[in-house]
Every structure is written in structure tokens, then in C-alpha cells.
Amino acid sequence: MKKLQIALDLLNFDRAVEICEEAVEGGVDWIEIGTPLIKSEGRKSIKEINSRFDKTIVADMKTMDTGSLEVEIATKSGADVVAILGAASDSTIKEAVRSGNEFNCKIMADLIGVRDYLERARELEDLGVDFILVHTGIDEQMAGSDPLDKLKEVESSVDLPIAVAGGIDKSKSIKAVKSGAEIIVVGGSITRSKDVMDSTKKIKKAIENASQLKGKPTKQRTRDIVEEISTANLSDAQHRKGVMKGLKRVSGSESEIFGRALTVRTISGDWAKPLEALERSEEGDILVVDAGGDEYAAWGELASNSAKIKGIKALIIDGAVRDIDEIRELDFSIWARSINPEAGKPKGYGEIGNKIQCGGVNVKTGDFILADEDGVVVVDKKDKEEMLQRAKMVKENEDRIREEIKQGKTLSEVLSLKEWEKER
Ligand SMILES: O=C([C@H](O)CO)[C@H](O)[C@H](O)COP(=O)(O)O
């Protein structure tokens, strides 16, 4: 569902509230307390707007340093999303993400002024931010820059939801949706208009209509391919890279699952971090847990219940689970190394979102997981498009072979095994 976010880039709080009321009337989804408003009125502007409107609140802090502190200030003032600068150092980004995890808010990384924006977008995804903002600042706009010039390539380079900002009006909002933006940020085209409510309504309608337009965005193409392929096809496509060892499906009726990994590392039987990861997860995520491969259960039926309600698609755990009958009853998909009634304790060792080993394979948050009755395969996020296409080709080749077998040839004849067997 696309979101229209109004950017309240005003200096006066009372005027900002007035405009916000009209924009909410017009159907805006998210409310951004713009940098100018925060700088002129302080964190009170976040608190007051949050207390008056039941909407997702974005604080455009444009954080460049002290990531943890600025995220804490914004979240304690009521922000649900904090915008920081993608140009900030990796340690500032990591600190902001950690603080976001602690205070249960999302981090939006703004690519404003970043020269190598594609590479930086991928780095920011690795660092664990929740959204990427493709943004042309006010001054850059005056020099003729347009965020839509970068939007499509950024959208297909990362698998995070993309926001776009910078001179967006009704016609640009349509192009932004068609280029894959999920969150459309609009400042002046609404806040400077004569009729704020009407302008908001018009842009909102344009976004909704554009969302129904034909033309498959990248993510739809991914879904189409995933429905066709299996982990076996993907294993062949990756020359056996990314295939987890020793984990088997223990529950779930979906023929296969595909989604973005959220990684967790914990120690023997310690079930705290796998549970805490649910606070950090996005709907559709797959929890991938390195539980040390041992036999103490680090997950059970209650955790499965909570995960399912959060929209977690599946659990892949290099370790043990328990309550398997109830989990099967729940129809929550799990691939695990073992099943064991003995659980450990919630000590809280380990971490969320960092690179782990699971089933003998390196997994980063943001990598893709395909799992079915055969097992689990990890696809590095930067290779996703290519590997899915290669797996599709593997599948199509097998479909052709199957047709030749149906016409009477044996498999070894079709594969000319005798001719090649010593060469492989
Ligand atoms: O972030 C913004 C800018 O840097 C001033 O703080 C604006 O909120 C963003 O550019 C959206 O505003 P418009 O460009 O006026 O739509």
C-alpha cells in the first residue's frame, strides 16, 4: 500500500498544525515533522503533532552524528520513523539502527547529497536501515536536480521500501509510483498550495490510480519467478552455493516460502534474541537463527504464535524447536535441525541483524531465502535478480527435457550422459 507523506517544512508551529489538519482531511498517510520545523520549534513540534494526530509520525532529523542520541530524542518525542543522513558514517548509522531497535522505531536513510548513491544504498541496507529515501534537497531542486532520475535504479538495487522526496507534485507522484516508490514525500506542493486539503486529495488519488496501473514493478516480477522455481533449480543456478545443510522442514503447509532474511544469533537454547527480533521485523520477513546447532529448543509454540501475528513468513533455525504438534496446528513454517522438548533460558546473549552462519551458510539481513520440502537456499541480496533469472532458465531447461522423455527418450539419452560422463 503506497503511502503519501506530508513534509511540514515550516518555521511556525501553529501554521504547521493548521496545514496538517487540512492535509489529514485530504487523506495524507504519514506526517513528517520537517527539518526546518524541528530546528525552529524543537522536539516540542514532534510531541505536539504526535499528540494531535493518529498517524505515522516521521521526524526528519537529518542526523549526521550521535545517531543513537538523536533517534532517542525523536522517538521519545513520539516519532515512529526517524530520517537520518545516508552520508553519515557507518558507526552513526549503526548506532541509529541500534537505537531504533531499542526504542521500536524505523530508520529512514536519506541519500541527499550522496555521490555514489547506489553503492551507499546497498551499504545502508546491510547496516540495517528500514527505508531508503531518494531525495533531492530544496537547494538541489533550484539547480534543476530531480529525485526521479535516480529512483528506478535505486529501487532495483535494494530490497527495502523506497521513499522519494524533492519537488514531488501530482504528476511526479505518478511517475514515482511507477518507478517503485512505496512512500511519496510531498512538501511544498501541498504546504504552499491555496487549498491544502484539495491538493492532498488530488495527489493521494493520483498515487492510488498509479498503483493500479499496468506494468510489473520489480517485486511483482520476483514473485512471478519464485512461483515457478524450486530450491533445486536455485541450487543448480548458484552451483550449489547457499544451500543449507542438515536443516529439514518440520512444519507448515505452504509449498514454498520466499522472503527477506532477518538474522539472529543466539547461544545454546537461549530464546531471548529470537523473540526480540520480532520487534525489529517487517511483515513478510523470514527469521534466520543461528542457535549453535545444538539440541536445546530456542523456539516453541508461543513464539510461533507471536511470529505469525507479526506477519513473519517462516523460521529457519540452526538449532532445535519444540511444541511441534501445536506449531503444525498453527500452520507456521519452520525449517530446523532438530525437535526437542527441552528448552534453554532467555538469557539474551547474541545479536539481531548481523551476519550469521546457519546450516553452514553465511546469511546477512536482507539476503533472500527460498525454502521448500527439499530444504533451504540463501541468495545474496545483490545477486537476487540474476540468480532468480538463472533458476528460471534451469527450470525451463528441465521442462524441455521432460517433454523429450515423454516422447520416448531415456533421461541418459537426452542428457547424452555416455558422451559426457567422464568430462563432468
Ligand atoms: O527534506 C526536505 C528538505 O531537505 C527541507 O527540509 C523536504 O521535506 C523535502 O525536500 C520535501 O519537500 P518538497 O521538496 O518541498 O516537496
Image: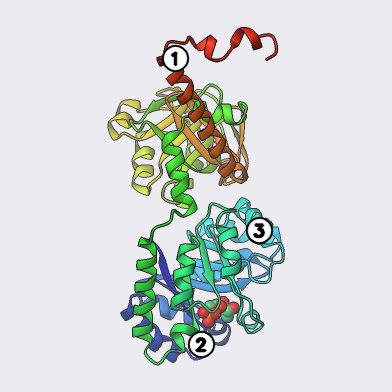
Which residue: 43% across, 44% down? 223
Q: CA distance from mark 2 to mark 1?
A: 70 Å
Graded by Cα atoms within 10 Å as few (under 14), some (14 to 19) or many (20 or more), the crowding at tag 1 reads some
Residue type, numbered disc 1: Ile
Q: Is residue 351 visible?
A: no
Point out residue 417 in the picture as x, y percentages from the top left corner.
Answer: 60, 10
Mark earlier in primary sequence (3, 2): 2
Residue 197 got which mark?
A: none
Secondary structure under tag 3 reads: helix
Which residue: 33% across, 79% down? 26
Depth order, front residue of 21/280: 21
Number of the front mark, 2 or 1: 1
Q: CA distance from mark 3 to mark 2?
A: 31 Å
**Colour mapping used in the image:** rainbow
Which residue: 61% across, 63% down? 68
**Residue 357 sits in which quadrant?**
top right
Residue 10 got which mark?
A: 2
State ligand 1's quadrant: bottom right
Q: Is residue 231 visible?
A: yes
* 357 versus 340 height, above or below: below
Mark earlier in primary sequence (2, 1): 2
User: On the image, numbered disc 1 is attached to which residue?
Assistant: 405
User: From this viewpoint, which residue is outermost toward the top?
Assistant: 418
Residue 118 got which mark?
A: 3
**Residue 315 sits in which quadrant?**
top left
Depth order, front residue of 338/220: 220
Left or right placement of residue 273 versus residue 364 in this view: left
Point out residue 395 in the picture as x, y percentages from the top left corner.
Answer: 49, 29
Residue type, numbered disc 3: Leu
Left or right placement of residue 180 versus residue 91 in this view: left
